[in-house]
């Protein structure tokens, strides 16, 4: 229970359906400034979670997850930017904290399931769990696509069939004080909304200046640190005869490569850290899928090939724009909203 409306309603719906619910608020990091509308992990959020739990009549605990969060999420976040990639910390948090460390705590309590307020749907069938996108605009199945089948098996998603308006309506019906609370939208541990402040504090060398070049090696300017850029970015770049977009980040040489907009198009990608939720769908060579190369991306038709060593190759039906290494690529059924797996984009 983060203190927001989604997790509070998730707890309320479970309690109404006869589950024995325990509310857990995870203290992920220590804020250095007062909480605000888009933050979490502040005292106000803990109080909101506690008040909601009291109204629902369920026990509530605040647990210290700072070490696990720093190790599994923040450190990876910094390392990925230092390597010239663009990470998604919410994916790491779901994998290693919520369905990792929190699941271990659930084991000690004797709790069979971990529940969250994500907008996605799980169907439990004889052949295992099936993950589906929620049809509302807030669909969050992408952020859960790296969960292994064993993790999905013990995950409950009470908001799977709802949209945000319906969730707020349930909150009002349940008498929850968070029914109109503003939504947290920033990365939770990035206070003020600028991730670069976290990087500068934890890895000062990440802001070392370097060259901005074109694809043929011509130097056209200087950058103030590779972590300030991502593939597809245009702002903050020197004018370079039409080469106005970041097309590649070379961490080994501390170089930003720029090019024309058409140079952002890619007809394929390779990815690692492959997680197949429905592995049987990929047993016969090339597999048709729809692929999401970032959160909120429109799924694009592609052909997937599983490679040795937990790797994936995708070939797109139509070239895709600004594919960023470090981001997750989620694999969907070509004709339905089922999530078949995911991998971390490498190139």
Image (cartoon, rainbow, N blue to C red):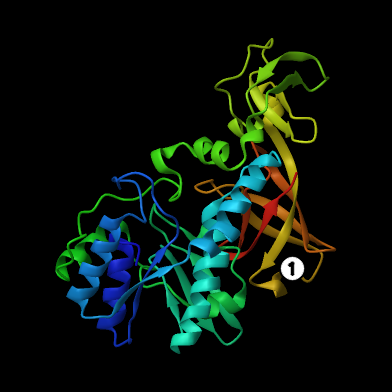
Q: Nearer the viewer, residue 233 or 253?
A: 253
Tell me where residue 250 appears, x and y as whole percent: 76, 33
Quadrant showing the N terminus: bottom left
Tell me where residue 126 appears, x and y as whole percent: 57, 87
The quarter holding residue 268 reads top right
Q: Can residue 52 be seen at all in this image of the molecule?
A: yes
Q: Nearer the viewer, residue 205 or 264?
A: 205
Q: Is residue 227 left or right of residue 67?
A: right
The residue that appears at 31% across and 79% down in the rendered structure is: 14
Q: Can residue 231 be seen at all in this image of the molecule?
A: no
The quarter holding residue 330 reads bottom right
The quarter holding residue 42 reads bottom left
Q: Is residue 252 above or below residue 167?
A: above
The residue that appears at 58% across and 61% down in the rendered structure is: 335
Q: Is residue 290 left or right of residue 51?
A: right
List the residue tagged with mark 1: 282
Tell me where residue 296 appears, x and y as whole percent: 49, 47
The residue that appears at 71% across and 60% down in the rendered structure is: 273
Tell me where residue 328 appears, x and y as whole percent: 62, 52
SS under mark 1: helix
Q: Is residue 137 above or below residue 100?
A: above
């Amino acid at each position: 229970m983060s203190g927001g409306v989604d997790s509070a309603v998730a707890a309320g719906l479970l309690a109404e359906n006869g589950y024995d619910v325990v509310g857990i608020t995870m203290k992920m990091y220590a804020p250095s400034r007062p909480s605000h509308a888009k933050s979490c992990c502040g005292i106000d959020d803990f109080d909101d979670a506690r008040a909601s739990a009291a109204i629902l009549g369920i026990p509530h605990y605040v647990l210290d997850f700072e070490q696990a969060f720093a190790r599994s999420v923040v450190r990876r976040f910094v390392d990925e930017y230092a390597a010239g990639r663009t990470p998604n910390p919410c994916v790491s948090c779901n994998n290693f904290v919520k369905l990792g460390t929190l699941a271990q705590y659930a084991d000690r309590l004797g709790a069979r399931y971990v529940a969250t307020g994500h907008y996605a749907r799980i169907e439990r069938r004889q052949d295992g769990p099936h993950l589906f996108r929620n049809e509302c605009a807030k669909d969050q199945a992408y952020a859960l696509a790296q969960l292994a089948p064993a993790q999905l098996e013990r995950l409950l998603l009470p908001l799977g069939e709802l949209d945000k308006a319906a969730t707020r309506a349930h909150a009002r019906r349940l008498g929850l004080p968070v029914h109109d609370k503003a939504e947290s939208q920033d990365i939770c541990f990035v206070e003020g909304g600028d991730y670069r402040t976290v990087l500068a504090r934890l890895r000062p060398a990440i802001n070392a200046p370097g060259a901005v070049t074109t694809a043929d090696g011509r130097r056209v300017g200087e950058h103030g640190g590779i972590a300030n850029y991502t593939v597809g970015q245009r702002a903050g770049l020197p004018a370079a005869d039409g080469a106005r977009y970041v097309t590649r980040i070379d961490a080994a040489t501390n170089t930003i490569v720029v090019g024309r907009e058409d140079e952002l198009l890619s007809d394929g990608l390779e990815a690692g850290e492959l997680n197949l939720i429905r592995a049987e769908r990929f047993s016969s060579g090339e597999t048709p899928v729809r692929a999401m190369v970032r959160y909120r991306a429109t799924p694009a038709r592609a052909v997937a090939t599983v490679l040795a060593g937990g790797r994936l190759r995708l070939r797109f039906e139509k070239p895709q724009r600004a594919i960023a290494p470090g981001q997750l690529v989620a694999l969907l059924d070509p004709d339905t909203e089922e999530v078949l797996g995911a991998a971390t984009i490498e190139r």
